[in-house]
Amino acid sequence: GTTTLTLHPDFRRGALDRRLFGSFVEHLGRAVYTGVYEPGHATSDEHGFRGDVVDLTRELGATIVRYPGGNFVSNYRWEDGVGPREQRTPFLDLAWRTVEPNDVGTDEFLQYCERTGIEPMMAVNLGTRGVEAAAALVEYCNGEAGTRWADLRIANGRTEPYGVRLWCLGNEMDGPWQIGHKDADAYGRLAAEAGKAMRLVDPTIELVACGSSSMQMDTFGEWERVVLGHTFDVVDHISMHAYYEETDGDRASFLASGTAMDRFVERVVATADAVSAQRRSDKRFTISFDEWNVWYLQSRFVGEKNLPIQRDAPRIIEDVYSALDAVVVGDLLVTLLNHADRIGVACLAQLVNVIAPIITEPGGPAWKQPTFHPFARTAATARGEVLDLRVDTATTTTAAHGDVPLVTAAATIDPATGHLALFVTNRSPEPQTLVLRTPGARLTLVDALEVTADDVPAVAGPEHAASVAEKHVRTFELGGDDGVDGGEGVGGEPAATRT
Ligand code: AHR
């Protein structure tokens, strides 16, 4: 089939917030211990953080990292993770039934972010704790000398405030699995009061209220309406979480996961806007899509749910990804980009080992999963503003989502350089011909990158990761009146390529 993309550099949806390329490190499995942190590893720095993981994180292009959870945060006492290491005691994390040694805590994480050039996104515990502990943590991180918690940070060796800007008011509080799970009223009231106190400590912070854990939650919609009602004057963002997987061999539906994400975003935006409209307010909440990925939750996670209590960073939720999963991740990124006018923050869940683009072996190498590539390429290339692109393509009928487009696309333009970047996903098993029309505009296509991988099932290990190849397939130069100018000299003609 043929897909025609029509674009004009002046037709724009909105500015791209670089925080769309965030990730997530939870105290879960081997995300922290033997993931980002492994004292004694050959590449580790003097703080015990693995240099090979830092290098891959930079290459991935993660702009922010959410921490310390996830479900973990809902039973976490942050005070237990600061101060002299020898005085810290392990605790039993009930979210994952794992003994948390407390070797890494707030200071270690925030200093790791500084060294890696990443912005931290912190979450407070609104499961087992509340207003006081949340405000105290903001003071610990951002307060100036002269008050209790800021002085504790200074006593722990860090004089300068960290200036953490982005804060999650709890995690998935709508989920019955969450420690301290609440109904929308109870959570909304608590989040409003915690947020109010946190902002009184530091008025410059941005706050994220918990939205639904997925669009499938029974309380979806009503949860957002009630929570945003309580927190209207306090929060900036409402969170979304979504994980996608192939079920019952339905590959076509899995490949169209971006359509499900698209509908989820539209429904949350509609609900949030209705809350504003009812108040006759111009306030527009933005979305913090702070957990998204492919996760074989139903098919592979089943056996990991009721494990005995574990110690020493157990291997849990270490999904191994295939080239197919990488296509879906690319498609989800296209969806996120196309909603950049309302999505302010997004986090690929997670960064290392746990449903992650980066895998490590304790004492051994670190490598990229296939899903690393679409994320890294998009984070590196998408800049500036997202264009309002028209995509004329065939549709296919899927069992899960009905009719869906076969090809999806997003484009950005960087006003600073004039560079336009186009991201295209082919959801069909067949190659597609792509025609790019740019009426009234003159573009020069300078580079096209092809990411290829063998169509093989997911296989663990660095050797498999190396089977994903990236190559620069064409270089175009030249000019014309409209359309895209190609290296073969097709001035004024639309450019066609295969995707
Ligand atoms: O990312 C893994 C888990 O998924 C998180 O802890 C939780 O927030 C979500 O259910």
Image: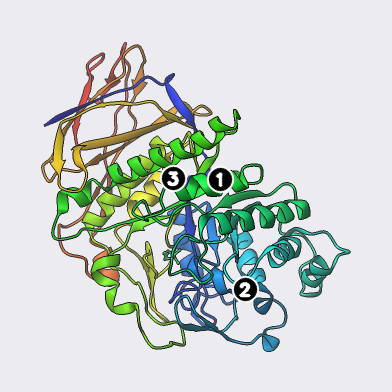
Left or right of residue 134, residue 349 in this image: left
* In this view, 264 is above or below 32: above
- CA gap between label 1 and label 2 equals 31 Å
Location of residue 120 in the rendering, given as x and y in whole percent from the top left corner? 59, 57
* In this view, 85 is above or below 235: below
Of the four image quadrants, the one with ligand 1 is bottom left
* In this view, 184 is above or below 339: below
SS for tag 3?
Answer: helix
Q: Amino acid under label 3?
A: Ala
Q: Which mark is residue 380?
A: 3
Q: Are marks 2 and 3 in contact (CB under 8 Å)?
A: no
Q: Amino acid under label 1?
A: Leu
**Badge 1 or badge 2: first in the primary sequence:** 2
Marks 1 and 2: which is nearer the front?
A: 1
Q: Amino acid under label 2?
A: Gly
Q: Which mark is residue 105?
A: 2
269 or 250: nearer the viewer: 269
- CA gap between label 3 and label 1 equals 34 Å
Question: Which residue occupies 26% across, 66% down?
Answer: 298
Name the residue that disc number 1 marks: 228
